[in-house]
Image (cartoon, rainbow, N blue to C red):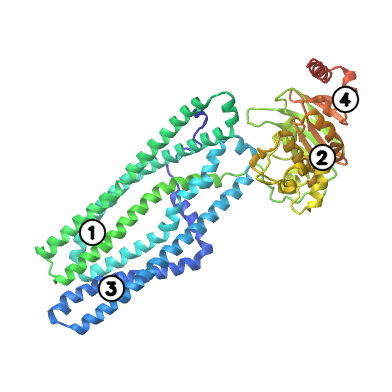
Amino acid sequence: MAQAFRDEEALQEKPNNKENFKRIGRYLVPYKKQVILLLLVILLANIIMILGPYLTSLVIDVVIPNGDTRLLVMIIITYAILTVLSGWTTRYRLWHITLLGQDVLKDMRSDLFIHIQTLSFSFFDSRPHGSILIRVVNYINNLSNILSSGLINVISDVISVMVTLIIMLAIDVRLTLYSIILLPILLWVTLIIKNKQRKAYDELSQKQSKLNSYIHESIAGIKTTQSFTRESLNHSVFSDVSNQQRDAWMNAVKVQFLLGPIVQNIAIITVSFIYFAGIRGLGVNVTTGVLIAFVAYVNNFWNPIVNIGNFYNSIVSGSVYLERIFNMMDIKPEIEDAPDAFDMPDVEGHVTFDNVTFGYEENQTIFENLNFEVEAGETIALVGPTGAGKSTITNMISRFYDVREGAILVDGIDIRDVTVNSLRDQIGVMLQETFIFSGTILENIRYGQLDATEEEIIEAAKIVKAHDFISELKNGYHTYIHEKGSSLSVGQRQLISFARTLLANPKVLILDEATSSIDTQTEILLQEGLNRLLEGRTAFIVAHRLSTIRNSDRIFYIGDKKILEAGSHDELMEKQGRYYTLYKTQSELLSSI
């Protein structure tokens, strides 16, 4: 089963990291006031940092030799004020950088979630849901360090390096050159580590996605797993996938930790150079105070370099996550509004398929030159063998998929010419697998019409025969149910879905095996509600239980990429064709049970 999870995006040979971080920068634009204040505070912190070693050099070179007590007191007071200010700038920076980073992450997560909701069914058909989830949660969270404590901090560190370098050059050019003599080596080592680290984190992100996908699938299929007693097999597969993720993690961490020690060692060697230059000569002549201050400035120079190196590690690993996130954001929905799309006017429900050719894949054809016309208010039943395309017809009407050739018209309007939302607002869809959201029964029914009153909700439930069982629950319509409605029977979930659809009051209704999970007795009770539901609406009913469609105005028998038979139940039975054979076979099978 683990092999089923393929890597969704291959590692790009030349990742566009520059563009990716520009896109992050655009998320900072709404917060430019906060960014400017942060930069001012950072500048103040750097001024304080510069003054510290300078005051120390004054004490050593001036105060101590001259015994200048008055100057010493002034330096102590100044140092105390600077210490308080330094503490304030540190607190301000940490708090507001974290807040800014979390705001940006919230905006990015929101944009990603909104974008995912616009993607076509084909996107979700071809990807494990776990690999989608990991981008919205894990990958965004992995960027937290970059945005909450990295992006602005690295600006602070860059400013600190530049200011310190200027001060060092002003003190002594030759000492400064000794201080940065190993900088080219550091840059060379960084470039070597960069590619290894990026590949390691790309491998890690793929293994994390694979693990998350398997966990999601295993939880979703837990009933099947337990029914077939496959817990041990699943654990074996999980252990294998988990071990792969662990190995990838350890490899990524090993590469990541290479840069920090290298920078620290270079900093130590640099201080040694300064010691020999200042103490042993080498053409450098400075006072003791200036030398001590210079060593402090060298530390102030290399400490930000270390921080920048650590941030660079985060950048390299974060660039992999950014690449995944923005790749998903850049996926264009297959179903989009045309540039000149208009809102669908109130429809009567006249549906036409005009020479429709369709296939889910390029090399697949499910329908070829399909033609039929349905009058407003007509009920059409779709029957035929599994895989013939019954549900495909309903999916195309709702524009979950676009036709390859031809057109689908509603009231004479090509559905590709109107906005998707305005079209789907007037189409009610009920599927065999009804999804119940976590929340109250009232909220689940109201999902079909968010401004519906409680009285309207109860009336809809009464019509579809859901009111009786809801009233028997402890809290009635305010009973809280968990995701997928696990505390309800399959039939009860279907009745709630019927009430939800009725409340939405669609002009075109699609029932795709909507009554298959309801027992015969409940179906008899529901029939009156179904008649109310179908009243005045154009309806397409997909059903394997043929007894539920006998009263349909017409029945389409689907097969061989077209409609093979069409007519009322009586007409098709009299014809004694495919529908007749299917109906007789099903009737004999049911009578023998």
Residue occupying image coordinates x 23% and y 68%: 169
Residue 55 quadrant: bottom left
Residue 414 visible to the viewer: no
Q: What x and y, as percent, mark residue 350?
A: 84, 40
Residue for point 34% across, 53% down: 310
Frontmost residue, 131 versus 80: 80
Q: Residue at x 31, y 45 (%)?
A: 192
Q: Is residue 429 left or right of residue 285?
A: right
202 or 457, which lies in front? 457
What residue is pinned by disc 2? 464
| Three-letter amino acid code at the position of disc 3 | Leu
Residue indicated by mark 3: 51
Against 539, residue 587 (above or below) is above
**Which label's residue is closer to the chain start, 2 or 1?**
1
What is the x, y in percent for residue 586? 79, 19
Q: Is residue 269 left or right of residue 581?
A: left
Question: Which residue is situated farthest in the left direction here?
Answer: 280
Q: Earlier in the sequence, mark 2 or mark 3?
A: 3
Which of 548 and 373 lies nearest the eye of the viewer?
548
